[in-house]
Image: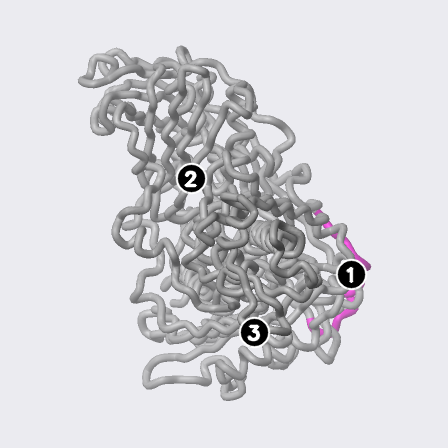
Amino acid sequence: MSTVGEPISRVDGRLKATGRAIYTADTPLADAAHAAIVHSTIANGKTVSIDTGTAEKAPGVLAVFTHRNMPRINPTPKPWSHLHPHGQGYLPLQDEQIHYAGQPIALVVAKTRDQALHAATLVAVEYQAERAVLFNRETAREAVDPPQFLWPVASSVGDAEKGIREGDHKIAQTYTTSDRHHNQMEPHATVAAWDVGGRLTLYETTQHIFGARELISIVLGVPIENITVISHFLGGGFGGKAYVWPHTLLTAVAAKALNQPVRIQLTRAQMYSMVGHQPATIQTIELAADRDGKLTGIRHESTSPTSVFDSYIEYAAIASRHLWRASAGIATNHKVVHVNRNTPTAMRSPHEALGHFALESAMDELAYAAGIDPVKLRLLNDSETDPLSGRPFSTRAIRKCLVEGGARFGWNKRTFAPRSMRDGRYLIGQGVAGAVYTHWRWPAHARVTLKSDGSALLEAGMHELGTGTYTVMQQVVADALGLRPEKVTVRLGDTRLPASHAAIGSATMANAGASVMLAAKAARNKMIELALTGREAPFADSAPDELVVDDGALSLAHRPHKNVNITFAELLARNGMSELVANGNYDPVEEASGPKAVFSFAAVFAEVRVDPDLGLVRLNRLVGAYDPGRIINPKTARSQAIGGITWGVGQALLEQSETDPTTGRYLSRNYSGYLVPTNADIPNLDVMFVGEFDEEASPLGAKGLGELTAVSVAPAIANAVYHATGKRVRDLPITIEKIL
């Protein structure tokens, strides 16, 4: 009985569709008070006075905290680490300084949420304001070299300048992307409850329960064993919920001070200044190729904003380190500008999605400069070894993505010249872009328990973001134990379970999934051992490799027709056991230390329809060809791809968070002003998976998929817009005025 590879529907689908899935803000704590935040209306300066008198007298108010009476907490640890991931280094309500618009300056706690929100409007604040520093082309000239954050800030292989100087065909352009916000369907929320023994239970919208526990332990000075973090379901994370933000810490401190559970749920508007965002980038790219189209040199530099107190880097140029080879060399670098805004953070798909827009747009420009078909140009510059490290790729199916994806799309019917394809009065354009995505490796642990009724229980501290984790992990256990999927129960999202890693970087299936597979196989092997050596062992004269598991029973592989088998339930009962427990511990080497370079790959083909009079761009159709290694569940994988492509359409055509040049505040802090794709914007999407089992990536053979699918959608669309109109748009999003 094999369930891996089957398109099984989500086991939690009915819970979610009927409203029975308990999200953080739904957590039923009857005696919980409610908190509301008062925000700074200036972006730089300090508070001179905060009058809380009227608010404190408002109905239902229990307390109003400011920097004057908020208990002091420890600073966030340095250096930053995924093991204790704070969203920003500066902790509000600890002093009078203001560093960004929307910074929390007071916390109101009341009996009901409405009472707290109302009282928050009654807090009167006077400021000493200073001129805000904002991100633009002028301040970008003041960019500085940041300290290393994730990867090396700069890279250089060979002599890129020589390769660019000596190339026959050259491109040198600047590409820009806009500030964007996560806009998860579920707002961030926290419910904090302390017991009489000083133990904290935190119900949290988080993609990293163990990282949250670690960070809270450090900042609040609470022993880690006294903290439990719970997150059973998330209504979207997209990176923004992978970190601990100030509202979580403030809520926990308030709950302890009041000796009462406190609940906070951010409003949509608050999420624009409270929980990170994807920063804008200004990227310069130089490409050079010989007369045949083979790249000789690549130089890619990116500048992005960060807060005045942190040095977050958007590693946009990382795309150019790995995707295409260049014979002479490749050089990349990143700079940051410290401005008055909250700290940026990872957002699907961080780093790569922004850098690919620049790189793959430049590749398209190079194709036209050299008179070479854009697919052919990419095939010419394919590489079997990683350009940065020189290691061979574990698997690299980008050639297959380009060839098979192109065949599915009908690329051979495309005419080369811009403005050469029409459908009536509409201009038709077709574009392509390749993609590479980082493979993350993290340790993970899981526990599988076989029950006396023949069912299995999986327990692991991983996360369900809406991606289908409950379902695919159920499949992995069922597959290893030969059980029907409905016989496997899955428990996730609780730090009392075996520790796992953050649900970021599209890493859950390859890493957490590997620990689940190892735990299930360990349970299977223990059952086989019982069958061979236990009480009244039914297969005492057999070897372990002669036994197979199927439908909850053990049998001899070479004598299935004899019906010689024993069920798990019977075997446990015969040995006087109520259950059998096995653990799976996956501890991979760091990717950079492995013998091979591991990445996921893709090619995206897009067709757009452009109204020549109105400049309106519509996506007609799209084919995405992906190499994420082994596919565990084609249905959930396709769902991830549809979501990722939709995300990329938003990046390409709609999304931008504009900042008021005077106040430093985001102008649109809701869905009416910040545009995201809707059903009407997305046509039928054609998704294909062309990867193969990658043993270097994971014992499961899987690589990252979810974020890969959002990479290179934007450049494919931008290249299609150029093909349709003859106008090259190098600034995202591609809006009507840029076409006209």
Q: Considering only vertical position in the picture, is 449 above or below 80?
A: below
Residue under the point 53% across and 44% down: 577
Q: Is residue 170 above or below residue 301?
A: below
- Is residue 259 located in the magenta-colored stretch of the structure? no
Nearer to me, 411 or 630: 630
Residue drawn at (47%, 35%) of the image: 341
- Front in this rendered view, residue 127 or 233: 233
Range shown magenta: 154-169
Residue type at tag 3: Lys
In the displayed structure, 120 sits above or below 161; it is above
Say if mark 2 contacts mark 1, CB within 8 Å.
Answer: no
Mark number for residue 463?
none
Question: Do labels 3 and 1 touch, CB within 8 Å?
Answer: no
Residue 78 image-quadrant placement: top right
Q: Which residue is mark 3?
A: 562
Is residue 165 within the magenta segment? Answer: yes
**What's the amino acid at mark 2?**
Ser
In the picture, the quarter occupied by the C terminus is bottom left
Q: Nearer the viewer, mark 3 or mark 2?
A: 3
* Residue behind mark 1: 391
